[in-house]
Amino acid sequence: MIKSMTGYGRGEAVTAGKKFIFELKAVNHRYNEVVLRLPRSLSPLEDRIRRFIQARIARGRVDGFLGVEECGEKNATVKVDKALAAAYYNAMKELQETLGIGGEIQFQQLVDLPGVVTVEEPADDVEEWWPSIQNAVEEAVDNLVRMRMVEGEQLARDLLSRSERLFYLNQSIRERSPFVVEEYRERLVARLNDYMRDGIITPDRLAAEATIFAERSSITEENVRLESHLQQLKSCLTAGESVGRKLDFLIQEMNREINTIASKANDLEISRAVVEAKSELEKIREQVQNIE
């Protein structure tokens, strides 16, 4: 079944006191583009996450956002640099003596000095976190794909309905085509009779008129090719692969056939059917832009 290129997916996972939240948003795009925003500490995982997504998403622009929340106690450690504190103290005592300033040096003064007391967070271990992050990514991708499939089913129903309408319009054109040929033949005979009556008809002129008649009157090939393209379109809509680009090509070919029919068949009824067919084809083209 075809899939839409738009959708949203979200996944979560918890490990080592951290909660990882991964969100995906997908929109239309001609190619397969994945843009990720990760905390700097998790940047080594960017390529892995991108490959994981691209293995499941064939087409479209996908924006991924990975967030981290603390959900447990931090195992931070507090360190005191005793040597640095002593150096500060000695320097302050020396400065007092030099400047002749009295007073006691307070404990709080030493603690507040840079580097005396530091808090160290545990080192980030992205490899330890990766299995949980991968689970969050997989859950988000699954949800995204599921939404794209639901939208794809809706698109398929609409496109099948419009393709049926195009098939009906093509049939009506085929049914009208013989009458157009007959009407054109009658006009050609009348023109040739005028030439013969005026004595200006020549073999070359006759051959030229016959050629014009053959080129302009027959639209059978265009009808057959248009019907073939419509059948291929229906087959694509039930396929389980990425068919967006193939559908783009089919629409171009159908548009070419319809334009040729319009230029060949100088008939009011056919012209009306062609206008309606072009309108339906344009609506199909707009919908196909959203198919993976």
Image: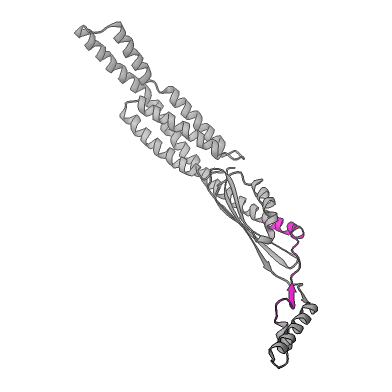
**Where on the picture, by quarter, is residue 73?**
bottom right
| Closest to the observer, 119 or 170 | 119
Q: Is residue 50 left or right of residue 217?
A: right
The quadrant the N terminus occupies is top right
| Residue 39 or residue 120, whichever sits in front | 120
Residue closest to the far left: 198
- The answer to if 49 sits in the magenta stretch is no
x and y, in percent, of residue 115 in the image = 73, 76
**Frontmost residue, 107 versus 212:** 107
Is 282 placed left or right of 83 in the picture? left
Location of residue 17 in the rendering, given as x and y in whole percent from the top left corner: 74, 68
Q: Residue at x 36, y 29 (%)?
A: 262
Q: Residue at x 37, y 24 (%)?
A: 177
Q: Using the image, determine if residue 109 lies above or below residue 27.
A: below
Magenta-tinted stretch: 112-136
Q: Quadrant of the C terminus?
A: top right
Q: Residue furthest bottom?
A: 103
Relative image position of residue 189 (x, y in whole percent): 28, 13
Magenta run includes residue 120: yes
Q: Kindly indicate the quadrant of the structure image that contains residue 18.
A: bottom right
225 or 68: nearer the eye? 68
Q: Is residue 82 visible?
A: yes
